[in-house]
Image (tube, helix red, strand yellow):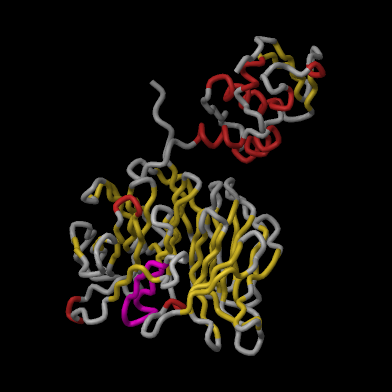
Amino acid sequence: MGVQKDRVRFNVGGRIFETSATTLANAGRNSLFGAMFDDNWNFHPGHTITEHFIDRNPDCFAVLLDLLRTGELYLPSNMPEKLLYREALFYGLLDHVRSAKWGQFDGNRLKLSGSVTGRAPGDGTAIRAGPDGGCCVAHGSMVHVYDWMLEEHPTINLDYQRVNDACWIDPESIVISACERLGRGDGGMGLFNASTGELRYKFDVKHENQVKTFTAGALCFSPDYKLFSSCKGRSNEYGIGVWDQVTGKQTDFFYEPPGWSLGDADKLQWLNGSNCLMVATLFPRKDNCYISLLDFRDKDNMVWSWSDIGASIMDERRVRDAIAMDETSSICVVNEYEDLGFMDLRRAAGSVRWSSRSRLMKSKMPDEPCYPKLAVHEGQLFSSMNDTISVFCGPDWVLTSRLRRSYGGSICDFSIGGDRLFALHSEENVFDIWETPTPPII
């Protein structure tokens, strides 16, 4: 950038600050200061006045100016974090604060940074990380939404419809799936404003040109703005629905073949590498597990499938969760003992290669255990078991670290997004926030 070394003076709340155009240019084009420069990062003629007055908090401005100068964030002990975040939002510097506060996500270096407690009625608990570091917690018929500062937004209340899943489309938009209530004609899916809780529009299922009531289950979306959901209706609309998430219009529907349970799917995952959708129906929703890959470009759709039908009941390795890994062309599954199993997607569906190296304990399961969950993020594999999340790395998925705290009960769900890991515990709707600290300054 061809930045002039001009001095710039600010009067912020009565205090005088002087800096250079080079320092201000570090704020980026989308900041308040970016508007002071032309396309060549030279000052606009209208911004050559000797002093700019800003009626804001001068103490916070000093911290943010130092951040632009050094790339390091130093927060005085007497300054509340939320006050600095508010001021950073005004100047368009939230991303700078976040990158200085958090290091690059690494499951082996995660540290517990805080916990949030609360209560909500009902069951069906899930947590979903937002793309900007916030999250939402679905519990019963309610969804509690938190921004990246962990301030709670207005609660989304579905009027006694049980929430099945939630999916962030962007930092301001959440899709929620819910059970259809018999005789009411409601349920299905809706797109909500994350900040206000306002319903923007509903996603309809049409069959033979008629709008049908349905229960929506697992959710996911693809980079080309397609939204997928498992659907279960009253007539023939059992399977996977596809909508345009921008317009809300249904674009496709894959009806489940005989003997399978796509409409009851617990988990959907879009695979960018293969351009396919993984659909998993798991125990205990069904007595048997069904995992398939759907390619909506192919008229036959189902390009890979696996089920544990016929497996030995004495094996006791019922699949509790599944996740596909594009990089290794494989699917990882986990059982109730946190044994990891792997299937090669490059081969016809066959047996699972189980590994018990991940077992955390051989002791008795809790009276009310939370089923294991899986996640993959930046080449690392995560698996929850009771009150601990295990991290696996390398081509052989070696156990490298464990995340655990001393209270909150078993982990019923966890999610990764916005450079944070959120872990939701079974007791009183408590969830933890894990972050990667910045590397030490040498």
Q: Is residue 280 magenta?
A: yes
Would residue 49 be found to the left or right of residue 62 on screen?
right
The location of residue 227, given as percent across then percent down, is: 55, 63
The location of residue 162, given as percent across then percent down, is: 56, 76
Q: Which residues are magenta?
A: 279-294
Q: Against 252, is 173 above or below?
A: above
Q: Is residue 67 magenta?
A: no
Q: Is residue 353 visible?
A: yes
> Which of the image's four quarters has the C terminus?
top left
Q: Nearer the viewer, residue 404 or 44?
A: 44
Would residue 262 be found to the left or right of residue 12 on screen?
left
The location of residue 101, given as percent across then percent down, is: 50, 35
Q: Is residue 370 visible?
A: no
The image quadrant of residue 64 is top right
Would residue 356 be found to the left or right of residue 307 on screen?
left
The image quadrant of residue 160 is bottom right
Name the residue: 54% across, 37% down: 98
Q: Nearer the viewer, residue 224 or 96?
A: 224
The location of residue 113, given as percent across then percent down, is: 46, 44
Name the residue: 35% across, 67% down: 321
How many numbered callouts?
0
Name the residue: 39% across, 27% down: 440
Q: Against 1, is 203 above or below?
A: below
